[in-house]
Amino acid sequence: MSFSIQTGCPATQHVESADDMADAVSQMYPFETEEAVLVWNRIPVLLEYRYDIPVLLDDLIPLLEKIQAPQFSQTRVYWGSDTFSAEWNLRRDGETLTIGSRWDSTSGGYEALLNERSTLTVEIRSFVAEWLKVLRRITSDLSTQSVHLEDDDIAVRARALLMKSS
């Protein structure tokens, strides 16, 4: 079916330093700013830059690294934000991913519809490219703000993923 992410152009506010990338993201985007929109089998799911994305980062970066490895066969990830709570079971079939999902909570209340359309098949490179748009937006905004990160592990790994795709 379909999977895409629209990153938009969220407003930012000044952040001098933060504990890590997730902390910086939660501080950098104000309460009332544009959201990213994840489209799952033609169903829009809003991702708040201030709340959802920081919670996803510590699982998203390792996931993107893992699924691109030639030896990857399957994995499970649980997204635990209050407004983006889902479990995804990802399985490789050649160059495609089949993702079985269970949706518990989303902004907009589309859980029932998402659970009806719970299985998604997408090319690995397309899945990664869509998430890299989010990482590109965040790393660009962090760079523009010159945010100092006490623990930059996830940020370094995010930049490595972006460099690998160029």
Image (tube, helix red, strand yellow):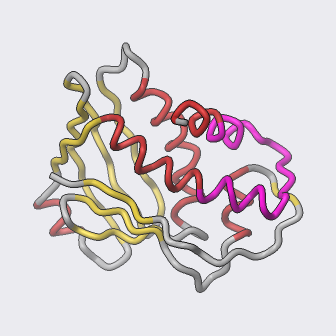
Find out whether residue 157 is within the magenta segment. yes
- The x, y position of residue 24, in whole percent, is 74, 60
In which quadrant of the rendered view does residue 158 lie?
top right
Dominant secondary structure (helix, strand or loop) of the stretch shown in magenta:
helix
Q: Give the residues drawn in magenta, as a range.
A: 137-159
Q: In the figure, is residue 52 to the left or right of 127?
A: right
The percent position of residue 22, horizontal first and vertical second, equals 66, 55
- Seen at 21% across and 54% down, the residue is 2
Tell whether 120 sits left or right of 14. Answer: left
Horizontally, is 9 left or right of 28 in the view? Answer: left
121 is higher (above) or lower (below) than 133: above
Decide which of 155, 102 is in the foreground and name it.
155
Considering every residue shown, the one lying at the far left of the view is: 116
Q: Say which of 102 and 22 sits in front.
A: 22
Residue 61 sits above or below residue 21 on the image: above
Task: Give the residue drawn at x 19%, y 47%.
Answer: 120
Residue 21 in the image: state x and y as whole percent.
71, 51
**Residue 102 in magenta stretch:** no
Furthest residue toward top? 71
Residue closest to the far bottom: 32
As displayed, is residue 58 above or below residue 80?
Answer: above
Q: x and y percent of residue 25 in the render?
A: 67, 62
Which residue is painted at 17% across and 69% down in the image?
A: 112
